[in-house]
Image (tube, rainbow, N blue to C red):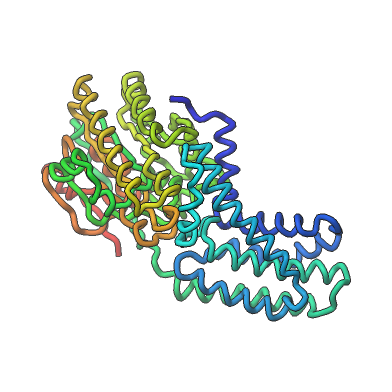
Amino acid sequence: MKSASLFEIAAARCWNVLNEGKSFTPVFVLAVFLLVQAGELKAVPLFYAILLNLPLFVIFYVYDYPLHLRWFLFGPLLASGLLYGGSFDIGMWIWAFGLYAFFTVFFWGTLYYHLRIGTTWWNFTRIWKLFLKNSDSTSGNVFEQLPKVFTLLVTLDWSYRLFSAQTSAGSVAGFLILSACIGMYSWVIHRLLFTWKPREYPSYTAPIHLDDTPAAKRMIVFVIDGCRKERFEEADAPFLHQLMETGVYYDRMETVYPARTVVCFSSMFTGTYPREHGIRSNMVWKLGVRVESIFDTLKETGRKGILFGCAHLIDAFGSYVESFTAVEKNDVVDHKIMAHAKTIMKRELPDLFVIQMIAVDQTGHSRGVLYQEYLDKIKESDALIRDYCEWLEEEGLMEGTAIAVMADHGQGNGIGGHGHLDTGERYVPFLLHGPGIRKGERVQEPRSIVSLAPTIAALLGVPLPSHSRGPVLMEALEAGSSDKHTEKVG
C-alpha cells in the first residue's frame, strides 16, 4: 500500500477549499464573475466592488445555512433581486448554474470519483439526484450554494457597474444598510433556529486510578469511516454483529459538531471538542491539534500509538499518522489498507493502533447511502475486520488486545453528506470487545465519541489527555473500576 505523497497531501488541502461550502462560495462567485466579464474587465472598479461586497462575503462565510435553514436564504436573494436586479444580466445566472452543475455532477461526481476511486463513467445519471438531496454545508448543497451565489452575483454586478459609472441606481450607503440587514437576519435565524448541536460535557474527565496491571495490553480501533448506524445494523455483517452481542454495544453514541472526518478524529483522540482542540473542519488552517492527544500520553509513558489513515489526518496528528494513499479503486482500497495494517502491526507492535477504513464513506459520497452498494461495502468491512482478527490470533497478538469498532460520523441522504447532523449523521455504531470489557451489554444512554480517548487511557493504564472532557465508559468496563468517578452531560 502506497503512502500519501506530498502531492496528494497538498492536493487534499486544495480540494478542501472547493469541498467546504464556506470557502467554495467566494471562490466560485469571483470565478464566475471574472469569466463573464473577462472581455471588458476593469481592475479598479472590480477592486472597489469586491471591497464593498466584502461584508456580504464574510456574512455568508460565517453563517452556514445547512439542513432546513437553507430555505431562509431566499430572503436575501429576493431582497437583493428587488433592489439591484433591475438591469442584472440574467446570462450571468445561467453561467453560474451551468458551471455549478458541471462542477458538482460531472467534474466532482463523475470525473473526480472515476479517476480517484474508479466509480463508473455513468455516475452522473445518479449523482445529480443525490446532490439535490444533500443538505450539509459543503459545496454540494445545491439549495444553499445557489441562493448564496445568485445573491452575491447580483450585488457584485451592481457594485461593479456603479464604480464603472454604468448605473446610478442606489447608493453605497443603501448597499451597506442591506448588508447590515442580511447580517442581522442571519444572526437572528441562527440564534433562534440553529438548535441541534450536541450538548457538551462541561468539565474535564475525572481523574482515573491507574492499576499496576492494565486491563488490556494493547488496543486496536477500527474506524469504518462514514458508516451510518442503522445501515450498519441492517447489513450482512455476521462477525461485527457477533462482537456487538458478546461485547458492549452503544445505541446512542453521538458524534461531534461539525461531523467532518478530521474534526471527529481530533475529538475522538483528544477527548474534547473543536473549540478546544482547534480543528473545526477538514480544511485545517493551522496544523496540529492544540491540546494533548492520547498519542501524546502514550509517548510520554514510553509507549506507542499509531494512526493509519488518509492524508487529511496528518493535518491534525502529524507524525503519529502513517498515511495511505486515497487514490485507489474503491473495490480494493480497504483490502490494501488492511493488508498493510498487518505489516505495520508486525513491524511496530503499537500499544494503540487505529485503522481507518474508507470504502464505506466513499461509497456513500459517490453512490448514496440508501442503495445496496453501501450495504455491500459494510459487508466487506465485516469480512476484512474478521480476517484481521483471525490473523492476530494466528500471530499470537490477540491475547490482551481490546478492540473498538466504530464510525467517526454517520452519513446523510443525498451524496452521503455529513457535518451538520442531518438524519443518519448524528449517531454512530460503536462497540467494545476484549479484556477488561463486559460481555453481552447494550447501552441505551446517550454517550459521545469524546469518551474514546479517556476509555483507551483507562484500559491501557496511561494518564488522561490533558483536556479530555469525555467520561470514561465505565458501564463497558469489567468490575474493578467501578469506583472511578465520571461526569455526565448537563
Compared to residue 324, the image places residue 55 above or below, namely below
Identify the image quadrant of the C terminus.
bottom left
Residue 266 as seen in the image, left or right of residue 74: left
Residue 250 percent coordinates (x, y): 22, 51
User: In the rendered view of the protein, which quadrant contains the N terminus?
Assistant: top left
Instruction: Kindly identify the residue that appears in the image at 22 percent across and 42 percent down.
Output: 237
Residue 358 or residue 292, whichever sits in front: 358
Q: Residue at x 75, y 55 (%)?
A: 35
Q: Give above or below for 229 relative to 458.
A: below
Spot the residue most to the right. 165
Tell whether 284 sits left or right of 343: right
Q: Nearer the viewer, residue 141 or 104?
A: 104
In the rendered image of this protein, does residue 248 appear above or below residue 28?
above
Q: For this rendering, which residue is in front, 61 or 153?
A: 153
Vertical side of 302 occupied by 56: above or below: below
Q: Position of residue 33 (x, y in %)?
A: 74, 59
Residue 234 % position (x, y): 23, 51
Would residue 465 be found to the left or right of residue 432 on screen?
A: right
In the foreground, 415 or 144:
415
Residue at 39% x, 40% y is: 359
Asked whether residue 244 is in view, the answer is yes
Residue 49: name its quadrant.
bottom right
Q: Quadrant of residue 447?
A: bottom left
